[in-house]
Image: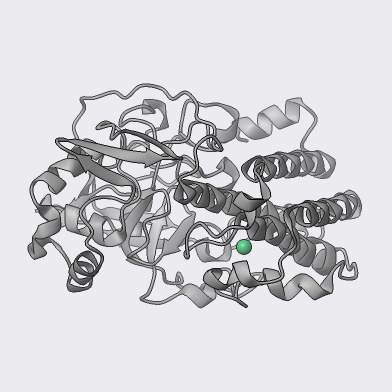
Amino acid sequence: MTDLDAALGAAGLTGPTGLKERIAAELAAVRERSLAYTDADDDMLVRQHSLLMSPLVWDLAHVGNYEELWVLREVGGIEPLRPEIDHLYDAFKYPRKDRPSLPLLDPAEARKYISGVRGRVLDVLDRVDLTAPDPLRSGGYVFGLVLQHEHQHDETMLATLQLSRRPGLVRDGELPPGRPGADPEVHIPAGVFTMGTGGGTDTVAWAYDNERPAHRLYLPGYRIDRHPVTNGAYLEFVEDGGYRDPRWWLPQGWEWVERNGVEAPLFWTRDGDVWWRVRFGREEPVPPEEPVQHVSWYEADAYARWAGKRLPTEAEWEKACGGRTYPWGEADPGHHGRWANLGHRAARPAPAGAFPDGASPYGVEQLIGDVWEWTDSWFQPYPGYRCFPYEEYSKVFFGETHRVLRGGSWATHPSAVRTTFRNWDYPIRRQIFAGFRCARSEE
Ligand SMILES: [Fe+2]
C-alpha cells in the first residue's frame, strides 16, 4: 500500500466509490489548471505564437474533444455533441502551423463546449462500473487516459506561453535551495533489471501501452551523473567554443547548428560577459546552479561528447531509478513536496541537489521532475508491445525519428509521470522543458 493509498483509505477514498471520488477530484484539478493557462485575452489565445505550436484555444477545445471521444462516446455510448468539429481537433488531420486558419471554436465557445462535455463525463463516471473486465473501464483507465492527456496539453500550453514571451501570465513559486558537494557521478553495477511495467492495467493503473510489457534486461556496469547538467556546467561548453567545433557534433547536428546559427540554448542571449535568459516574458541572468533546459538532443549529445561522456540509454536511465514507481519508492509525489519538483510548484527547474529525499536507491537525484532528460535511445516498442487503446498515441511514432525523454519536468503533473513513463520528440526540438544528464561506460 502506498502513502497515497493509505491517505485515501483514511479519507474513505479507496474501493470503487473512493476511486470515483478521487477521479472526480483530479478531473476538477486538471480543468482548473487548463483554465488558468488560458485566462488571457482572446488575441493571446487565438494567435499562433510559434509555428511549432497550436493556438492555445486549440489545445483547450482539443482536450474536451478527446474527453468526448473516449469517455462519452467510447465508454458512455453517448451520441456526438458536435460531430462537425471533430476534424478540427483531430491532432493528425492538420499540422500545427495550419491550425490558426481553421474555423476553430472561439475562446468563449471552447470553454462552453468543454464544460458541457465535462458535465456529461461526470454522469458517466457516476454510473460506470470500474471493476468491469473491459480494460478501458477497469481501474478507471479511460479517466486516467483523459486526465494525463489534459495535463500533457497543459505542459504544452506552458511551452506555448514561454514561446509567446508575454510576461505576467505564468505564476512562479518557491523551491528548496541546491545542495552542492557529493560525488558528481554514481556507479550502477552490472546486472539484470526489470524495464517497463506489468502487462495488466492493475500494476501501474494508468501506464500507457508504450511502457509495457515489463521485461528483463542485462546492462553492463556504468556511471551516470548524480544530477542533471546545470547551466553553469553547460556554459563551460559554450565558452569553450563548443558551438563552433564540429568535433563534438553528429553530422546532422552540426548541419542544424550551422543552418540556424545556434550558439546557446533557446531563450539565452549574451550581453558582454553575462548570459541572460527570457523566462515567461522576463529577462534574468542565467542561474548557474539550475539544470539547463531548452536544449535539443543534438546539443545534449554534443555536450556529452565534449565532456568525455555520452547520453545514457533509456534503459540506463530507468535502471538508475532502482526499479520502483518513483526513485524514492511508491509514495505519490503529489501529496508532499519533498521528493521532486513537479506540477508547476514554480515556473523553473530546481537547483542541483534540491531534492536529496527524492534520490533513487543508487543515490541518483532529480530523475523525476525539473527537466525532461534526453536519452540516447530512439523511441521504439518494447518486446511484446501491444497497442492499446489506439495507434496514434505511440505506435505511429516508433522508429528512428524521435529520441526518448524521461522523467518529466517542473511543468509535468505527478499523475503524468513515473519511472517507466516515456516521452519522445525530434532531436532538433528545444521548446520543451528538456535538459539531460550524462553517463559513461565502465572502463
Ligand atoms: Fe492531444
**Residue 300 at x, y percent in the picture:** 25, 55
- Quadrant assignment, res 39: top right
Residue that protrudes farthest toward the front in the picture:
43
- Quadrant assignment, res 60: bottom right
Looking at the image, which residue is at 27% across and 47% down?
437
Looking at the image, which residue is at 22% across and 62% down?
261
In this view, the residue in front, 349 or 239, is: 239
Report the coloring of the rendering. Answer: one colour
**Residue 70 at x, y percent in the picture:** 76, 65
Looking at the image, which residue is at 40% across and 77% down?
399
Whether residue 213 appears in this view of the structure is no
Task: Give the vertical position of 258 relative to 343 (above or below).
Answer: below
Image quadrant containing the N terminus? top right
Q: Is residue 245 left or right of residue 409?
A: left
In this view, the residue in front, 213 or 171, is: 171
Task: Give the vertical position of 63 relative to 188 (above or below).
Answer: below
Whether residue 264 appears in this view of the structure is yes
**Residue 4 at x, y percent in the picture:** 64, 33
Task: Give the vertical position of 27 relative to 73 (above or below).
Answer: above
In this view, the residue in front, 99 or 295, is: 99
In this view, the residue in front, 254 or 409, is: 254
